[in-house]
């Protein structure tokens, strides 16, 4: 078995994350152009993720945030972004490393990037030096709904949300651009790591 010592899978994912970094950097400095808005899903248990205990308890594995109408203090660095959002009328500050992102979607142009979790440690090679690098790929299942955070609003402008109302209710997909249902062909262009792998 041929060993991929170059690790093209990691290089491709780093290139895809650089797209997200560039787009968010532009949004932080210039705002969102036109109808562009972003749905960003990330692993809440990943190293470096900063969430309040309340949000961590509500989203123990994965959550999706929406950067659209109102968010504040978006800051982008080489390895992460930080942003202020409102959840049920409560302001929160989120810290999300780019390596924690599982998907990035701009529904205004039907563009989607999906990321797999990849272990970068190659591990000990066997005696013949032909042992493949250790890896673990995980893509979000297409049929599993992702929790969606509330449509971001600063606390000063948002009305209180009833305690029994789930946060994701206010961030539903716009009526004019419904999300694809399980079993239906997706209209978005999804860039997946599998496309670049040798079959």
Image (cartoon, grey):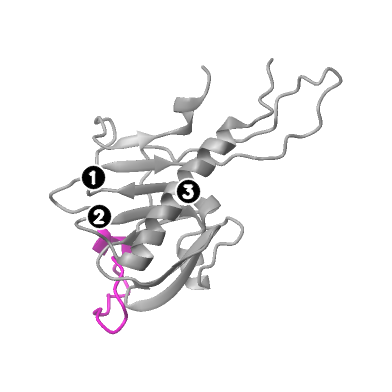
Total marks shown come to 3
- Point out the residue furthest to the left here: 176
Residue 199: give x, y in percent of width and height.
51, 17
Q: In this rendering, is residue 103 above or below 54? A: above
Q: Can you identify the residue that label 1 sits on?
A: 109
Q: Which residues are magenta?
A: 151-171
Labels 2 and 3: the sequence-earlier one: 3
Answer whether labels 3 and 1 touch (C-beta < 8 Å). no
Residue 83: give x, y in percent of width and height.
42, 69
Q: Nearer the viewer, mark 3 or mark 1?
A: 3
Q: In this rendering, is residue 132 above or below 107? A: above
Residue at 54 percent of width and 58 percent of height: 78
Report whether residue 102 is seen. no
**Is 3 positioned to the left or the right of 98 in the image?**
right
Residue 81: give x, y in percent of width and height.
48, 63
Labels 3 and 1: the sequence-earlier one: 3
Q: Nearer the viewer, mark 2 or mark 3?
A: 3
Residue at 56 percent of width and 42 percent of height: 117
Task: Provide the secondary structure element on which disc 2 rests.
Answer: loop
Residue 95: give x, y in percent of width and height.
50, 66
**Is 73 positioned to the left or the right of 136 in the image?**
left
Q: Tag 3: Cα neighbours inside 10 Å, few (<14), some, or many (≥20)?
A: some
Q: Can you identify the residue that label 3 sits on?
A: 18
Answer whether labels 1 and 2 touch (C-beta < 8 Å). yes
Of residue 141 and residue 111, the one placed in the foreground of this image is 111
Task: Provide the secondary structure element on which disc 3 rests.
Answer: helix
Q: Can you identify the residue that label 2 sits on?
A: 36
Q: In this rendering, is residue 22 above or below 6? A: below
């Amino acid at each position: 078995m041929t060993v991929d010592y170059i690790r093209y899978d990691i290089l491709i994912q780093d290139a895809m994350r650089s797209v997200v970094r560039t787009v968010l950097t532009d949004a932080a400095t210039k705002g969102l152009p036109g109808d562009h808005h972003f749905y960003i899903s990330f692993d809440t248990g990943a190293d470096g993720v900063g969430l309040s205990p309340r949000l961590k308890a509500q989203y123990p594995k994965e959550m999706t945030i929406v950067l659209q109408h109102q968010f504040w203090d978006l800051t982008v660095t080489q390895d992460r972004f930080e942003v202020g959002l409102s959840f049920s009328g409560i302001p929160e500050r989120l810290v999300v490393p780019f390596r924690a992102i599982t998907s990035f979607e701009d529904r205004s142009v039907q563009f989607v990037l999906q990321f797999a979790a990849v272990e970068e440690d190659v591990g000990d090679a066997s005696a013949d030096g032909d042992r493949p690098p250790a890896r673990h790929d995980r893509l979000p299942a297409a049929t599993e709904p992702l929790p969606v955070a509330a449509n971001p609003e600063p606390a000063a402008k948002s009305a209180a949300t009833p305690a029994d109302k789930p946060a994701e209710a206010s961030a539903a997909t716009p009526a004019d651009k419904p999300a694809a249902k399980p079993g239906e062909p997706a209209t978005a262009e999804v860039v997946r790591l599998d496309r670049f792998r040798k079959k």
